[in-house]
Image (tube, rainbow, N blue to C red):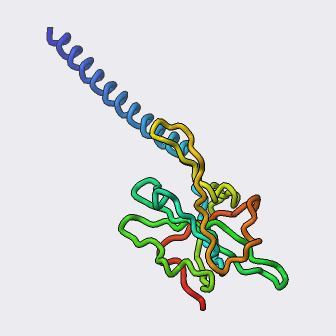
Amino acid sequence: MSRRNSSDALDRQNNKQRIRFYKAACLLTSLFLIGVLSLAQKPALPKTKTVSLKGRPLAGVDYLTGFLRGGLGDRYEVFVFGVDPSNRGSSIAPVKVMYRFFQSESALPDSFFDASKRYELEVVRAPDCDETVQSLSYQKNTDDTGKPLASTYILRPLTGTPQNVLKPDLMLPCYVLRPGRYKMLE
């Protein structure tokens, strides 16, 4: 009987060791798979490169809802900025700028929207929001049932903006500007 008891005790001890080994192997396998899957699911984030644009505001965009709203409480104010020509004889290059700010931050002051003032903007290129002057100029409207209504013209060219620079079919490269990343030059 004593031999059988010691054999049963040895079997229980071996079973406990197998169970511990099995648990440890499962834990290590799970950690390994989690690590591999997390690497596979996270694409490398592109590095955002800040560029400097010098020029003048050309037009504001007066959305009917005030500001465009993004996620996490951020808001956007949109305007067209005329980048100074890179060489003599060429004309200004209009671009779309989305001024991104949070509710705790200030919108652009009204004094910013003056075509006689030159600014330097430190911006980040955002190709996913490029659009034509035509598409930027109109806001689509719907009634309470979702039925489409006539679009509203929302592009507001500033006094002093050359008329021929905002051609409807012109594609506007898009940039994102953050608070404190601009300064007046003149």
Is residue 164 depicted above or below 126 in this figure? below
The C terminus sits in image quarter: bottom right
- Left or right relative to 34: residue 163: right
Q: Nearer the viewer, residue 8 or 186?
A: 186
- Left or right relative to 58: residue 63: left
The N terminus sits in image quarter: top left
Residue shown at 39%/58% (left/top)? Answer: 73
| Residue 16 percent across, percent down from the top left | 27, 25
Is residue 119 depicted above or below 34 in this figure? below
Residue placed furthest toward the front: 150
Residue placed furthest toward the right: 89
- Left or right relative to 103: residue 160: right
Picture quadrant of residue 160: bottom right
| Residue 177 percent across, percent down from the top left | 55, 70
Picture quadrant of residue 81: bottom right
Residue shown at 55%/77% (left/top)? Answer: 113
| Residue 107 percent across, percent down from the top left | 44, 71
| Residue 178 percent across, percent down from the top left | 50, 71
Residue placed furthest toward the left: 1
Q: Is residue 14 visible?
A: yes
